[in-house]
Amino acid sequence: MNNELRIMQNIYYDNSATTKVDPKVLKAMLPYLENEFGNSGSVHSFGQRALAAVDEARDKVANFFGSEAQEIIFTSGATESNNLAIRGVVDNAIKGGQKVHIITSKIEHPAVLEVFKYLEKNNLVETDYVEVDENGVIKLDQLEKKIKENTVLVSIMYANNEVGSVQPIESVKKILKQVQNDRGEKGLPLYFHVDAVQAVNHLDCNVDMLGADLLSLSGHKIYGPKGIGALYVRKGVKLAPIVFGGHQEYNIRTGTLNVPGIVGLGVAIELVAKEKGPSKLKEKLVAELKNISDIKFNGDLENQLPNIINISFLNAEGESILMMLDMEGIAISTGSACSSGSLEPSHVLTAMGIKPQWSHGCIRISLGRFNSEAEVEPFITALKTTIEKLRKMAP
Amino acid sequence: MKYTKKLLEHFQSPHNQGKIKNADGVGEVGNIKCGDIMKLYLKVGKNKKGDDIIKDIKFETLGCAAAIGATSMLTDLAKGKTFDEALNISKDDIVKALGGVPPIKHHCSVLAQDALKKAIASYKTRNS
């Protein structure tokens, strides 16, 4: 086909990977990349103006989570927030040489799972991984059984990044509360960490409602800039720092504050709070996708983030689907083995018990603020052509 | 991971893609790990010396862009060759002809070779 004659789409359906910075966010950030360049730790006016901007952003984030401003720690992103939450709790708990136990689920983001594996490998903790059902929801009875006398942390994501399954966070809260009650006020604390990265755009993130002691947030998933995130740390929760340096962020996360990023995060979260409910886009797409033969939706469409569709096509490989759509100017992602560095299918799909012939042809469509209804038809047309072409090539 | 322009051309418009009816040899292999499947069909003829040559070759692949690109390239390289010449096409030859393949995807080229080996073997079994 003549490349010059092809009509290129410009459809971005990979909003769970990252989002476009909202123009309002960018506008708010720009002064702090230009004349308001002060270090928020400086005593002079340049510094104090930067500090005022940081304080304002901190209030906005705290307001969103229903927390105190002092309970918000700015980080470089959700990976750091997750690392700080888990290692911070563990490092503090093992100070006296105690052997502690921590629990997470099999479908967490690598920024949680890899921290667990590191701690486990270095014999610093005992770990347990809760399984999920076929819809990618954790098995609560298993979680309850896995809690031991020396369990100090349970880390469960609010909503899964690949299949969008929403986890029963409030039920986890009840289980943990019961354990803490049994341990008594002076007993070993059992903290609850919630990775809320994918949930922030769509679900209620009030920390008291969730029962979260620690909660991770990322800027670039909510139309803010990359390189900024936050960790909510409930008052009284003891965390050891994992980065050493100055005295910033109550000595828990040292390093000069990323003032433009923090300002951007503040505006981004304010915009999320104002956003109206889920769009009809997903419904429309799902209805259209159902017209394609030999497909399977991964996860429960009823208990799923309103912006994620994870779908498998029999006899078409995920990375090939991605590449072919990319040539049309359409961006999606895949969890197929071929696309991973390890040649293993997505750990989430595997944990859900999805058979290899289905995970082989899986793609994730993740919608966002800047998608429109007008994109649905050209997307479906391109997808149908792609699937047809790939299936024709298959033995 | 980045694919070369050459590989993407083969992926977009694969050469020798399809089935051969009444093929003289067929080879099918699968990679259990990544889940890819490849099937090669051969039509065998003779050269002037009377040796068996690959007169026609076609493939079907359920796999990633690298798998499709590598098989397409292998069929180009093998067409018109004697069995010995075709079996001598190495993984590196395929990778080189594609202008490079990401290291993690080299096994896709190996898979294509294996399918060719099997197809030639199936012809030999049939005609022995």
Image (spheres, coloured by chain):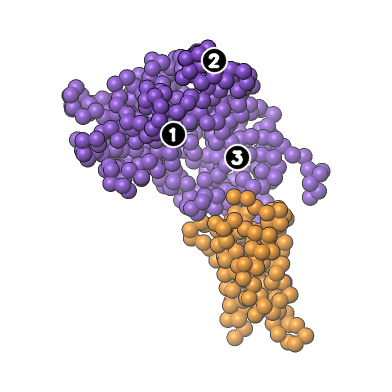
Chain colours: A purple, B orange
Q: CA distance from mark 1 to mark 3?
A: 26 Å
Which residue is disc 1 drawn over?
A80
Q: Nearer the viewer, residue A350 or A387?
A: A350
Q: CA distance from mark 2 to mark 3?
A: 43 Å
x then y, percent, for residue A53: 52, 15
Which element is circle 3 on?
Answer: loop
- The residue marked by circle 2 belongs to what chain? A
Q: Is residue A366 left or right of residue A106?
A: right
Give the label on residue A332, or none: 3
Residue B24 in the image: above or below residue B51: above
Amino acid found under the numbered disc labelled 1: Glu
User: In what quadrant of the picture does the C terminus of chain B appear?
Assistant: bottom right
Q: Nearer the viewer, residue B45 or B104?
A: B104
Residue A393 in the image: above or below residue A373: below
Which element is circle 1 on?
Answer: helix
Which residue is disc 2 drawn over?
A46
- Disc 1 or 3, which lies upstream in sequence? 1
Badge 2 and badge 3 both on one subunit: yes
Does the image show residue A279? Answer: yes
Amino acid found under the numbered disc labelled 2: Phe
Callout 2: 10 Å neighbours few (<14), some, many (20+)? some
Q: Residue at x 63, y 54 (%)?
A: B65
Q: CA distance from mark 2 to mark 1?
A: 28 Å
Amino acid found under the numbered disc labelled 3: Ile
Q: Residue at x 52, y 45 (%)?
A: A335
